[in-house]
C-alpha cells in the first residue's frame, strides 16, 4: 500500500492506495508541535479503525506547503515504514512543463493538483484550490503549467476581520441568502462568502481569456468553452454552489495527483541501508 500525505497550512489529508486505487482517506489538523511518534500513533489508530494492516504500507509520498513538518513526517516514514518518503520538489518527475519564471517557487500542492487534474480531465484547465489560500492554476492541453494567481482564502479573510476589528464577531462560513442583510452576522457572512464567489468568477473569467491568448500565440488555438474549471479543497462545495464557472468539484484531487506522481517515480527509488535510516533518524532527533 501507498500512504500519501497532503500537508496544508490548516489540515493534513492522508490517503491510502492499494493497486493504484484509493482505499480510504482522513483529515487531521496540521500541528508542527506533534512528534513523529505522535503522528505515527494517530495514523496507526486510523488504520486499526478501518481494519487496515499498518505493516502493509510499502511506500510514502508527501506534498507539503509547510516545510517545517517535512522532517517530522520523514522521520515517521523511516521509523514506522522503513522508507525514505518521496517529497514533492525539484527533481521529482511530474510530466508537467512548468513555465513559471522560477519553477522552484511553485507550491508542491499546485503542481500535484495540476498533475492530477490533467490526468483525470485533460486540458486546457483551470484548477482552483480553496484552502487556507485560494490558488488558481492554468494548464494547457499539452500539460504546460503556465502560472496562476494566489489570493487569501476565505478563512484567512474571516479571521482577519475578527482579529483586526474591535466589535465584529467570529462567524460561521455559510451563505446568508441575501446581500442586503439586516444584522452584523449576516452582513459579514455576505461579504465573506459572496465576496469570495465574486473573486472566483472574476479571476476565472480573466484567466480563461489569457489562457486562450497564450495557446493562440503558441500556435495551438483553443476556445474558452474548451477550458474546464476544476475546484478542490475544503471549501470547494460551498463556493461551487454560488458560482457558474466551476465545472467539477474534486475534493480528493491532490491525493490522486500524489498517487500518479508516485507511479512516475517509483522505478527510480533507491533502497537505503539500515545504517542510512538510523543516521537520518538520529538527525531528525537532533543527535547528529
Image (cartoon, helix red, strand yellow):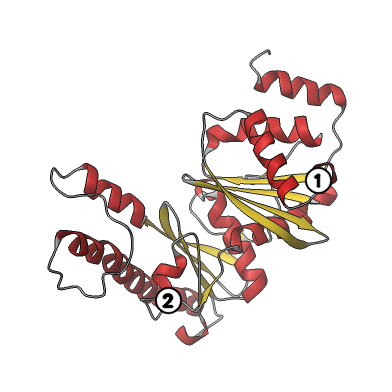
Residue occupied by mark 1 = 57
> Residue 138 — which label?
none
Q: Give the labeled residue for mark 2.
A: 208
Residue pictured at 63% horizontal, 61% vertical: 96
Vertical relation: 11 (above or below) 77: below
Q: Is residue 87 above or below residue 127?
A: above
67 shown above or below 244: above
Residue 164 image-quadrant placement = top left
Number of residues whose C-alpha sits closer than 10 Å to that of mark 1, classed few (under 14), some (14–19) or many (20 or more): some
* Mark 1 element type: loop
- Asked whether the beta carbons under mark 1 and mark 2 sit within 8 Å of each other, the answer is no
Residue appearing at x 64%, y 57% in the figure:
255
Q: Secondary structure at mark 2?
A: helix
Residue 213 locus on image (x, y percent): 43, 77
| Residue located at (37% from left, 77% from top) | 243
Which image quadrant: the C terminus? top right
Amino acid at each position: 500500500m501507498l500512504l500519501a500525505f497532503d500537508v496544508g497550512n490548516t489540515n493534513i489529508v492522508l490517503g491510502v492506495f492499494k493497486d493504484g486505487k484509493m482505499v480510504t482517506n482522513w483529515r487531521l489538523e496540521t500541528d508542527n508541535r506533534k512528534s513523529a511518534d505522535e503522528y505515527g500513533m494517530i495514523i496507526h489508530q486510523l488504520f486499526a479503525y478501518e481494519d487496515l494492516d499498518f505493516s502493509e504500507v510499502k511506500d510514502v509520498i508527501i506534498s507539503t506547503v509547510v516545510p517545517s513538518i517535512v522532517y517530522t513526517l520523514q522521520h515517521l516514514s523511516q521509523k514506522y515504514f522503513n522508507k525514505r518518503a518521496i517529497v514533492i520538489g525539484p527533481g521529482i518527475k511530474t510530466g508537467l512543463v512548468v513555465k513559471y519564471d522560477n519553477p522552484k517557487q511553485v507550491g508542491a500542492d499546485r503542481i500535484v493538483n495540476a498533475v492530477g487534474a490533467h490526468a483525470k480531465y485533460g486540458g486546457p484547465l483551470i484548477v482552483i484550490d480553496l484552502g487556507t489560500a485560494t490558488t488558481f492554476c492554468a494548464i494547457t492541453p499539452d500539460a504546460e503549467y503556465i502560472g496562476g494567481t494566489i489570493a487569501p482564502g476565505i478563512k484567512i479573510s474571516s479571521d482577519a476581520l475578527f482579529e483586526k476589528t474591535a466589535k465584529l464577531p467570529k462567524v460561521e462560513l455559510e451563505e446568508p441568502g441575501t446581500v442586503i442583510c439586516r444584522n452584523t452576522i449576516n452582513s459579514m457572512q455576505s461579504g465573506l462568502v459572496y465576496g469570495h464567489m465574486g473573486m472566483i468568477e472574476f479571476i476565472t473569467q480573466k484567466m480563461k481569456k489569457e489562457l486562450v491568448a497564450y495557446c493562440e500565440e503558441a500556435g495551438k488555438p483553443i476556445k474558452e468553452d474548451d477550458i474546464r474549471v476544476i475546484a478542490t479543497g475544503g471549501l470547494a462545495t460551498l463556493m461551487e454552489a454560488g458560482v457558474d464557472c466551476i465545472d467539477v468539484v474534486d475534493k480528493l484531487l491532490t491525493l490522486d495527483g500524489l498517487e500518479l506522481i508516485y507511479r512516475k517515480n517509483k522505478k527510480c527509488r533507491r533502497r537505503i541501508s539500515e545504517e542510512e535510516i538510523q543516521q537520518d533518524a538520529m538527525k531528525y532527533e537532533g543527535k547528529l
